[in-house]
Image (spheres, helix red, strand yellow):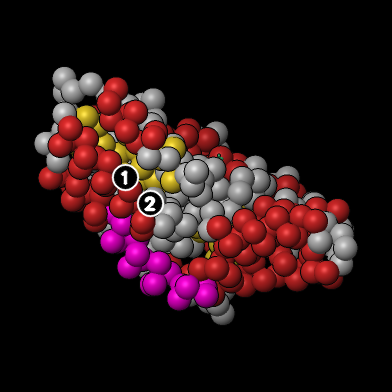
Amino acid sequence: MKKHNFSAGPCILPQEVLQQSADALLNFNGSDLSIIEISHRSKDFVAVMDKACALALELLGLENKGYKALFLQGGASTQFLMAAYNLLEKKAAYLNTGTWSSKALKEAKLFGEVVEVASSKDHNFNYIPKNYTIPDGVDYVHCTSNNTIFGTQIFEFPKVSVPLVCDMSSDIFSRQLDFSKFDLIYAGAQKNMGPAGTTLVVIKESILGKVSRSIPAMLDYREHIDKESMYNTPAVFAVYVSMLTLEWLKNLGGISAIEKINDQKSKILYDEIDRNPLFVGFAQKEDRSKMNVTFNLKEGISNQLFDEMWKSAGIVGINGHRSVGGYRASIYNAMPFDSVKVLVDVMNEFARKL
Ligand SMILES: *Cc1c(COP(=O)(O)O)cnc(C)c1O
């Protein structure tokens, strides 16, 4: 039976990308070799890496603007420390909007003074703080565009004259932004781009080389730029699948096309949450994420029947994170509108049955 995969990450990928990846695993480019058994320095793989980087910059509208795209390892979690390693000389400002921001902030403290400019921890991160001030003299400002666990998303980014660093792991390529407002963007592939194992880093080269510490090669963005993401063996398969997903997105019409679909998907789901007397949304309305939709059953309503119903409809992966409870439907780029409709119908049916 077809599954409707609402997992938060690793998560759903486009069916055609999975098919192409499966083919390349056995016979890549008609070479009678698998993509994972050829040299990463072979002409064919170098072309994959080049194309993945070029597509990332093209989709973000950052070609010829002084940015470099890299595919690194260690997940977004390594970027928490790598960003600080490369950019934090004295002081940095962090906006704390959830578990991932808190982790990023904690890592940065190993390298210098960190100012938490605002936090939504007081309400279990169900909103995005607004009206905060960023102190003078910071080396950069860090934020998390989409809070995967709590289901909030930033719609107004900090306006700053210092470098803006953003963890976009769970909403990159999902909505149009002026990406040139950011100086360092990073995103673990496994939320909206590919399988686990690689992390996209998009960085404005001019912000590098300003810290006085020496940086180990593996953690030095300049080293990875210089070696075109091949300082060490890259995660070849993860990069390949990411390239295919970016190609899929481009053929679909790019970010502006997918954004329209993402808007429709999140709208029917939030409309149902608001309309249905048995459910309540977790995040504050104006900060609701269009990628991770968090909701709970109203107090006193048993989850048993609902859980049976969505499971028998072929839905998987909607149990909420343990720090929020309830449910979380992750509706990333590859999630078809029709699968979201299946969930909405189940919620509706549940209210009629109970
Ligand atoms: C999943 C996630 C991370 C952690 O990514 P890893 O690749 O597992 O290190 C960081 N930030 C955000 C916003 C995430 O959703």
* Residue 190 versus residue 158 in the image, above or below: above
- Tag 2's secondary structure? helix
- The quadrant of the rendering that contains the C terminus is top left
What residue is shown at x 47% (from left), y 34% (from top)? 103
In the rendered image, residue 345, in percent from the top left (x then y), is placed at: 26, 46
Distance from disc 1 to disc 2, alpha carbons, whole Å, reads 7 Å
Q: Nearer the viewer, residue 189 or 2?
A: 2
Residue bounds of the magenta highlight? 250-266
Predominant SS of the magenta segment: helix
- Tag 1's secondary structure? helix
Looking at numbered disc 1 in the image, what kind of residue is underneath it? Leu
Looking at numbered disc 2 in the image, what kind of residue is underneath it? Ser
* Residue 256 versus residue 309 in the image, above or below: below
In the rendered image, residue 69, in percent from the top left (x then y), is placed at: 61, 64
Q: Is residue 231 left or right of residue 151?
A: right
Find out whether residue 91 is within the magenta segment: no
What residue is shown at x 36% (from left), y 56% (from top)? 338
Q: Which residue is label 1 attached to?
A: 343
Q: Which residue is label 2 attached to?
A: 339
What residue is shown at x 24% (from left), y 32% (from top)? 296
Q: Nearer the viewer, residue 238 or 152?
A: 238
* Callout 1 touching callout 2 (CB < 8 Å): yes
Residue extending furthest toward the bottom: 64
The answer to whether residue 96 of the structure is visible from this angle is: no
In the rendered image, residue 283, in percent from the top left (x then y), is placed at: 24, 40
